[in-house]
Image (cartoon, rainbow, N blue to C red):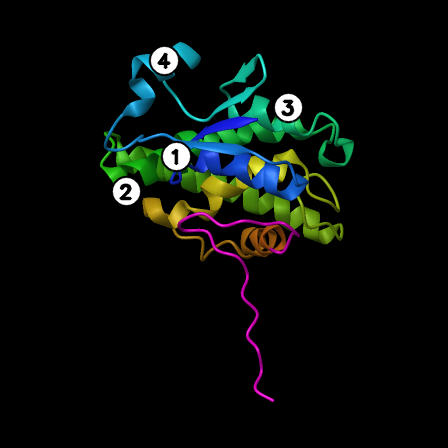
Amino acid sequence: MILYDYVLSASCYKVRLMAALLGTPLTLRAVNFHPGREHKSPEMLALNPKGTLPILQDGDTVLTDSADILRHLTADHPEWQSSDDDRWLDFASDLNDSLGLARLHDVIGYAADIDTARAAGVTALRKLEAHLTEQRFEGLIFLTGKTPTIADIACFPNTALAPDGGVSLDPYPSIRLWMRAIRSLPGFIEMPGIHRLHELAHPA
């Protein structure tokens, strides 16, 4: 499988992360999204007329929506699926359109109504915090149960990168615990702005 990838893209990262957690190898093809705008080149538009990333090519199958790619990667992994995933994949799209847009504005100067984007991002984070707090009361840590699903992987990147768009995560303790649980998963990989958990070694 080939992933046409931009290292700073939250949407591309969720695909890389999902593949890493599954142990599924990907061939990464770096795309000069910024400043090169290579995703708008004739070659890339032939793969994806929408001119967006990520793009996953698996044989004759080409997928250009991150939610569809997550479903594709986990097609043979029912443990990563739940009946409530569609709800959270839609919510992940809302996070991308708010927190993700604010981050694009602040990081690469993308044109946006930054106040509206940040306000929508805060609204989304409050909804996420409320749900995760209810989950904690039930003894659950992830969005749909005791174990992670594609719902968690879809929602994680733009949430974790919210500070890059000027939205603090300090008011959301349940979100921070959830993010820690994801970062603790075997096979977790980093991207710029999202790091592994680092245990401090105590001197002998």
The quarter of the picture where the N terminus appears is: top right
Q: Quadrant of residue 113?
A: top left
Task: Give the residue pinned by disc 2.
Answer: 107
Residue 130 higher or lower than 112, as above or below: below
Q: CA distance from mark 2 to mark 4?
A: 25 Å
First in sequence, mark 2 or 1: give its number.
Answer: 1
Q: CA distance from mark 2 to mark 1?
A: 14 Å
| Type of the residue with mark 2 | Val
143 and 68: which one is in front?
A: 68
Across and down, in percent, residue 61 comes to: 58, 14
Task: Say few, some or many: other residues with alpha carbon within 10 Å of mark 4 (under 14 / 14 to 19 / 20 or more).
Answer: some
Determine whether the residue tagged by mark 3 lies in a helix, strand or loop.
helix
Task: Give the residue pinned by disc 3.
Answer: 72
Task: Give the residue pinned by disc 4.
Answer: 45
Q: CA distance from mark 4 to mark 3?
A: 22 Å
The quarter of the picture where the C terminus appears is: bottom right
| Type of the residue with mark 4 | Leu
